[in-house]
Image (cartoon, helix red, strand yellow):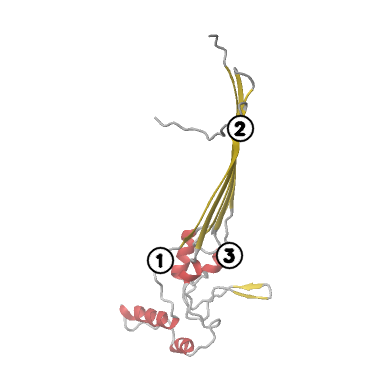
Amino acid sequence: VILVTTKRGKQGKTVINYNGSAGLEKATHLFKPVTDYVTYMQLMNRIQKSDNPDNADLFQPGTIDAWKNATDPVLFPNTNWMDVIFGQGVITKHNLSVSGGNDKTDYYLSMGYLYNKGIMESTDAQKYSLRLNLNHKISDKIKIGANLNSYWNKVNEPFDVTTLLYYSANSVPGTTPVMKNDGTVRYGGRNTDDESTNAINPQQYMDTWFYPQVGQYSFAKFYGEWENLKE
C-alpha cells in the first residue's frame, strides 16, 4: 500500500524555506577521433591500399603537404569534433516555500526553478514550477480547500542526436566548425577535392537543425467536506 500525502501548512508562525543546489556535468566516455588531419589522410591512404596495393590514394601528396606546412588554423584546421560537440554541463535547482496557518486556515506555497546547461553544446533545459495547497475551516462541520499544481518547461536540443553523432563520426578533422565576423556566420565545409562528400559539418547541424520543445501542465482540485454526524 502506497500512501501519498500532500504538504500542508501548520498552525503557527509563517515559515519560509529555501533550498538550492548546483552541480557540474561532463561526458566521461567519448570515442577519441583522429584530430590531426595529416595523420587522418595518411591512415585513409593506407586503408585504401590495404586490400589492393594498386588502388589510387584517396588524398594526394600535395594535399597532405599543404597541411604539413600550414600556419593558418582556419584554412587548415585540425578539429576535434568531440571537443566541439561536448562541453561542460551545469545544473542548478532552487526551491522556495512559504507555509503557515491558524486555527481556521493553513496554506503551503512553493515555487521552483531548474536550469540545466547540457553537456552537448547549444543544449539546455529550464523548468518553472508552482504549487499551492490551501485549506479553510468554515465551521466545525464544514471545510473547503484547493490544491493547485503547475509547471512550464523548455528544452533545447538538436532535432536528432543520432544523426548528429553520425555526422561527427563521418566528418573529418580538416573542417573548420564555424567562422563569425561582423555578424556573419559561416560554416566550414570540404577544403579539398580529395575529401568525401559525406564530410558534413556537425556544428552546422547543431545550430540549424534545432528542436526546441515547450511544455506546460496545470492541475487544480477544489474540495469541500461536510460532517453530518450527530453524536
| Mark closest to the chain's N terminus, 1 or 3 | 1
Tell me the number on the disc at residue 30.
Answer: 1
| Label 1 – label 3 distance at C-alpha | 21 Å
Q: Residue 91 at x, y = what percent? A: 52, 57
Query: Which one is nearer the viewer's eye here, 193 or 137?
Result: 137
The amino acid beneath tag 1 is: Leu
| Mark closest to the chain's N terminus, 1 or 2 | 1
Query: Which one is nearer the viewer's eye here, 171 or 59?
Result: 171
As helix, strand or loop, the secondary structure at mark 1 comes to: loop
Q: Is residue 108 visible?
A: no
Task: Name the residue: 31% across, 79% down.
Answer: 50
- Give the number of the mark in front: 1 or 3: 1
Identify the residue under disc 3: 207
Identify the residue under disc 2: 101
The amino acid beneath tag 2 is: Gly
As helix, strand or loop, the secondary structure at mark 3 comes to: helix
Near mark 3 (Cα within 10 A), the count class, few <14, some 14-19 or many ≥20, is: some
Q: Residue furthest right?
A: 182
| Mark closest to the chain's N terminus, 3 or 2 | 2
| Label 1 – label 2 distance at C-alpha | 53 Å
Q: Is residue 229 visible?
A: yes
**115 above or below 151?**
below
Instruction: For the N terminus, give its image quadrant.
Output: top left
Q: Are marks 1 and 2 in contact (CB under 8 Å)?
A: no
